[in-house]
Amino acid sequence: MQRMAIKRADYGDFNNNDVFDGRASIDAQCSPLSNCQVKSRCGGRRSCALTMGSNLLPSPYCRDTSKEIYIEYTCVDSKSSSLGSSIITAATKMRLTHWANEGFIQIKDGLIWRTVKEEHWDKNRQKMLCQHLGFKETNTNDISSNFQIGAGRDIATGSLVCYSKRPRETSCCINLVPSTSTSNTKMTWAKCKICDKPLSLSDDNKFSRNKVFSGSGGSKYYGNVRSNRVGWCASGSTSYLLLDLQKEYHLTHVMVIADRKQTKWSNSYSMKHSRAETLIDSSRSIQITENQNGYQASITQLDRVYNARYIKIQSNRKTDFCLRIELCGEVETPAPVNDIKVTPSNTSAQGSRTEFSITGLTRFTKYTVTIYAGDGSSQWSSSIDKIFTTNTAVPSGAPGLVAFTNRSKEQLTVSWSTPSRTSQNDKANDTSCGAEWYIVVVTLVSGIIIGILLSYIVSCSRRKFRRTQPQSNHEPKTTEADTTYQELDLTKLNTEDNYQSLRVNAEEESTYTDLNQTRDVEDNYQSLT
């Protein structure tokens, strides 16, 4: 008895005025599916009837069903090896190897899980496979081709094409030849998306197995609930899974899927959440979309789940089930601090709104204060910076090395050195410092000059008073003398006649006597003029 061995089944417009045109171009997008469908439905059969339509060639591969399928086949003996009696044309169990949403494609062939090598793998096939497994395509939907398996592995080579039959329903065409790898072999790798921001519970650095995962009932290996593990299996009516995420999260999605072997699962779950473990049982319960089969993930979008640190998941119906999960969302951080005001003083600063005090600062120094808000789980808000300068202070030490460097009739130049560093109060380099010392010096110099004038006026007054008393008739002798003093011009102070010039007549001799002489008995004094 003979049967059909299908060689090819290409889709295209082969009808040229009711004449078959074997040279016509094939539809490159639809032909991979048409080949898989015809080979899986007709290969090894004595007869085969196909109806062109969306059931046979559905979108997105074959949008135009007005064309034809060109089939090449031969009739061979029933026992011929070309029929491939062990060809895999259906698989009720399918999975990805490394994570629930990423890895090599494997199908269950009897008791054996075989790794698939899809001969025409592309972005569209990856997208439809992800949809079939309950996921979405990744944002870039890149194709990875550098992953290998070693020799001696159970593999299956051929066509695996998934497609949409109707909204939210998919199917896959399978035509795979089973074999065993003889060397390192590149295999098909698929990557699907659960959500935009998965928490990645499989990351041991972020979610320690011993700290995060616990529960009650069934297996004690609660960490196996992660998507890259074999799954956690429960037993008993009170079984539940408890997660302590260590931080508070805003959760947006939860994914549930059966264990890796796809042995058992629940079709109804509930989830509770709270920021404190003691409050979780009294929190509201959220229904999670059920698993319809073992290979397909179920992803539930969550509404207004904030401040969630503790997560409790349990089955509503079955008491004997296995589970793997993934959560999506992001860590909640405190709101940033606003309206902070810093009021500096000489060596400290005070902050407003949330009170704080900073001491031990240096005078006249610029500081930057960076302020965060934090919570009990060591989460921090974005920061703000406040810049301030501590107040200035008058130097506590006096200037040194004061000297008159230049004198003229109307100007006196004074120089000095700054105080020692320990007594500057960090203001020695301030330009206002010089002005303050200048005022002090001018005041001192003015006081000296005024003191000299007052002494001179008093001396003159006493001399005039004594002239009114009887004195000897001798006149003081006037002699020529060299000039020994510069005139002290006090700008207009010598306008009245009762002031005498301090300048000695250059043509007279000096007849001054020592002012420290003891007054004689006759009260004879020498004139200063």
Image: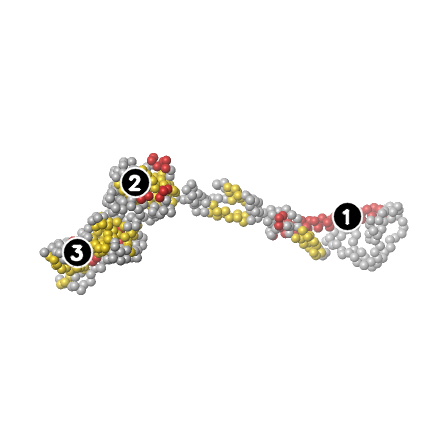
Foreground mark, 2 or 1? 2
- Under mark 2, the amino acid is Ser
The residue depicted at 47 percent of the width and 44 percent of the height is: 339
Relative to 31, does residue 309 appear above or below in the rendering?
A: above
Mark 3 and mark 2 lie on one chain; the one further toward the N terminus is: 3
Instruction: Judge from the rendering whether residue 477 lies leftward or rightward of residue 294; answer left or right.
Output: right
The residue depicted at 88 percent of the width and 53 percent of the height is: 475
Q: In this figure, which residue is indicated by the disc labeled 1?
A: 455
Q: How many marks?
A: 3
Q: In this figure, which residue is indicated by the disc labeled 3?
A: 84
Asked where in the image residue 7 lies, by quadrant, the reply is: bottom left
Asked where in the image residue 268 lies, by quadrant, the reply is: top left
Q: In this figure, which residue is indicated by the disc labeled 2?
A: 219
Residue found farthest to the bottom: 23
Q: Secondary structure at mark 1?
A: helix
Q: How is the image coloured?
A: secondary structure
- Under mark 3, the amino acid is Gly
Q: Position of residue 88 (x, y in %)?
A: 19, 53
State if disc 2 and disc 3 touch (CB < 8 Å). no
Q: Position of residue 239 (x, y in %)?
A: 29, 37
